[in-house]
Image: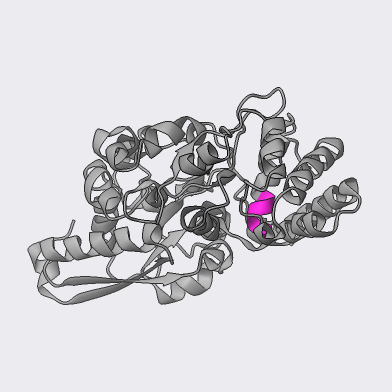
Amino acid sequence: MVTPETTKRSVCLRGITWNHSRGHLPMVATAQRFGETHPGVEIVWEKRSLQEFADYPIPQLAERYDLLVIDHPFVGYAARHRVLLPLDEHLSRDFLEEQNENSVGLSFQSYASGGHQWALAIDAAAPVSSWRPDLLERAKASVPGSWDELLDLASFGLVAFPAIPIDALMHFYMLCCALNCEPFSREGSVVEFEGGAQALHMLRDLVQRCSLEIRNLNPIATYEALTAGDTIAYCPFAFGYSNYARKGYGKHRLQFGDLCLIGKAGPGRSTLGGAGLAISVACKHRDVVLEYAKFVASSECQRTLYVHSGGQPGHRSAWQDQEPNCVTQNYFRDTLPLLDRAYLRPTYDGYVPFQYKAALLVHAFLREGGDPEATVRDIQILYERSHSR
């Protein structure tokens, strides 16, 4: 607990998040407010690119920063090497149980590994669909309800989605789930070869019906193209950013919703993302950062200051609250079912480098084609090597 005696001295803490309004502004706003209520405490938030958010080594960040906004696949490394503070040893069981009970999908659980909780789920996300109602109406088209309808719409040049390596791999996981071959569900195996090959074929078919430019787009660039242009009407899946559903954020507002039906499995099951707030084990002011972390993750902050500062909360109450939905055209209510069923990636120590290399293989197949089963075999080899490090 931070006491008046604690805050009499000057405490300056550094945090690192990612470079977007959703990632940076709510951290700045919460730090400002926390400093106002805790005189003498200053928290300075810096930012890194979205790609670095997915790839940059946690140990190097933990050496330089007290607070880290992280992607959950890093927690396996944290559990083995203890570069982050195990929050379950410093926060009350009641608080952590409340966070778990109000998790959006598996967001809270995604930051657990090795019997410890390494971060608080302050942000929740998964690939969702989005569209420009005005452009669909102009084209006399509607939101696709099935994969075949999506392919037809893409053939008219109205579809774009992020297909850089990391996003391509997430789409691959999604299609594998739709084909009843969930990745990593069998011990020692990434995916069954035939199902994985079919998923790659389906994804490449869709990519080839879109502009080649999508292979260079991340979710943010995709949303910027959707909101600023007048040709792309629909995005079938991209990690959701509620900012683009808000009035005044882009030239045009986007409507967001669930994924289309894929095969016989019903609406697509996309891959869980989001962000967690972690604390470096090297932080010298643990009492202060723990108090701040509890403040940011609290239902009250998440439903109000956090979401109104451009954030995309991790607390379920914010997704169900009327006010956040009012300002985002019901972004949260309309996409919550999708996040609740989202697929959770592995978090073992070694997964992050596997993910980086496997994403390059999927991206190469989307660019060049070839034998999809050979690509799946190469991904399997990477997986086996990642366990033998």
Quarter assignment of residue 329? top left
Coordinates of residue 304 in the picture (x, y in percent):
22, 46
Does residue 294 appear anywhere in the picture?
no
- Judge from the rendering whether residue 69 lies leftward or rightward of residue 270; answer left or right: left
Identify whether 299 is placed above or below 261: below
**Residue at the image position 80 percent from the left and 52 percent from the top:** 379
Q: Which quarter of the rendering shows the N terminus?
A: bottom left
**Residue at the image position 20 percent from the left and 65 percent from the top:** 32
Magenta-tinted stretch: 164-169
Coordinates of residue 59 in the picture (x, y in percent):
52, 70
Does residue 155 appear anywhere in the picture?
yes
Quarter assignment of residue 55? bottom right
Coordinates of residue 179 in the picture (x, y in percent):
74, 31
Q: Which quarter of the rendering shows the C terminus?
A: bottom right
Q: Nearer the viewer, residue 84 or 124?
A: 124
Identify whether 221 is placed above or below 305: below
Magenta region, main secondary structure: helix
- Judge from the rendering whether residue 313 lies leftward or rightward of residue 226; answer left or right: left
Identify whether 286 is placed above or below 161: below
